[in-house]
Amino acid sequence: RIRQEGGAEFFSLSPFDAARYARWLEGLEATEVLLSEVAHDNDVLRCDAEYFGKAILAAIHQLKSVGAMPLEGLAQITDGIHTSLPFTEYGNVKILSAKHPKDNYIDIVQFETVTEEYHSKNPRTALRENDVIISTVGTIGNAAVVTADILPANSDRHIGIIRLRDDAPPSFFLSTLLVGRYGRIQAVRETTGNVQPNLFISKIGRLLIPRFSDTFEKEVADHVSYAYLQRKRAGEYLSQAEKKLLNALDLDAWIPPATLSYVRSSQDAFAAGRLDAQFFAPRVTGLLECLGRDGLRIRDVAPVRRERFEPAGTGSFNYIEIGSLGADGTAAADEVPMAGAPSRATQHVHAGDVITSTVRPIRRLTALIAPEQDGAVCSSGFVVLEPQKISGEVLLTYLRLPVVCELMDLHTSATMYPAISEADLLALPIPEIPLAVQQRVQSAVRQSYEARRQANRFLEAAKRAVEIAIEDSEARALEYLSEF
């Protein structure tokens, strides 16, 4: 209704209409920014809502209130090799790309490699101990510190390399800031592009970095350093589990036949549906005889779980996709709104289940579902196994053995996305494993998981401490860290 009083017009809504309009506007926000502020330090004159969102501006304001400075004043920043890389199967120099830095650690799931000669010809992009690397495509803003055990290594163009100066904060402190709230929100803000969003090197240099006392920065760095050590120990425990299992299977010192030629009958070929020489190699035959000596198959000890997921209209769910699996036999779950459920989100998983990727099984992408992930949803690219006559930890270790992954890879089809069928996976041989061996393997895997939980606990504590220092005070942040 419109009414006039003293030459002025007033617009009013009925209570019903007011409530309706309020619902329409719920979740919307508006920011008023002066043109001079829009133009400041904004060479491409971005004026999109994402760049000037309230949360982003509040974070920038908070960083400036504690005297944060651009990263380019503290470090030399570059990126990796821009040309196509001459990968070689047995190179001794790792190539790090955007998939390797995660939430303050480097995922060692799989490295492409190059020769030492090629590495020496590219010194600008060669990584050094204590470099901080940050992903610039994909999941933008993941960051981690390069440690000695990763080297020698080089890098491709999809990561930024941050080499801190002597007067800069410790590398572990910077990586923690970058993966925390104040680092991520800046990285997302500075990302540009539609088809393949990218965080350019020039934008990395603009990220605001707060400085604190040497005592606080070192305390944060020490917590993160301890977490890195625990994660390394977790990997060592997994290696121990594999060695124990290989020993029990008599494969630790197994030498495959080195026959240069071999003959198979047409009956064998047609029965297998294969004509390639690799499938009938004496090495493969030897492996199958060794692993199949008891006549058991994967399906006999761990049948498939079939619990279909149907998205509801509202709410969210925890989703595990193939890219969420790490080299350590764990799976990360991301919260996804029901309305945005991917078409491949089809299967429920429960604590103790073992999931293994059918795509490129040679990558050893198998994980054990943790108790806190009970009821999560995984991609249709996994086979979900429910261990019944074998420990979940032992099945995890078995499916990650390189020789078993080799057999899985032999059953893949297609070139772009080689995948093994569920039927072929379930038909893989598995010997009876003595209970005493299972217990030793299970113990090593559980120690690995406990070390990793400890690492995650310290990483999260360090991240939160940095946020407390920015929002409250160093004293409060140090008090918080003392609890860990």
Image: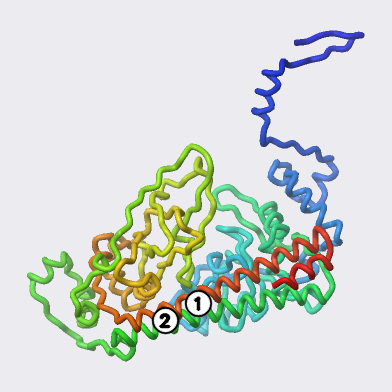
Residue pictured at 69% horizontal, 72% vertical: 484
Q: Is residue 175 left or right of residue 97?
A: right
> Vertical placement of 87 versus 185: above or below?
below
Residue pictured at 20% horizontal, 86% vertical: 260
**Residue 76 visible in rendering:** no
Q: Hey, what amino acid is under mark 2?
A: Ala
Q: How many marks?
A: 2
Q: Is residue 4 left or right of residue 193?
A: right
Q: Secondary structure at mark 1?
A: helix
Q: Alpha carbon of mark 1 to alpha carbon of mark 2: how far?
A: 9 Å
Label whose residue precedes the other's in the sequence (1 or 2): 2
Q: Quadrant of residue 37?
A: top right
Dividing the image into 4 quarters, which one contains the N terminus? top right
Q: Secondary structure at mark 2?
A: helix
Indicate the position of residue 50 as horizontal and vertical percent values: 69, 45
Of 53 and 441, the residue lying toward us: 441
Q: Hey, what amino acid is under mark 1?
A: Ser
Q: Are marks 1 and 2 in contact (CB under 8 Å)?
A: yes
Of 31 and 395, the residue lying toward us: 395
Indicate the position of residue 146 as horizontal and vertical percent values: 62, 77
Q: Which residue corresponds to mark 1?
A: 448
Indicate the position of residue 55 as horizontal and vertical percent values: 73, 47
Residue pictured at 82% horizontal, 49% vertical: 40
Q: Which residue corresponds to mark 2?
A: 241
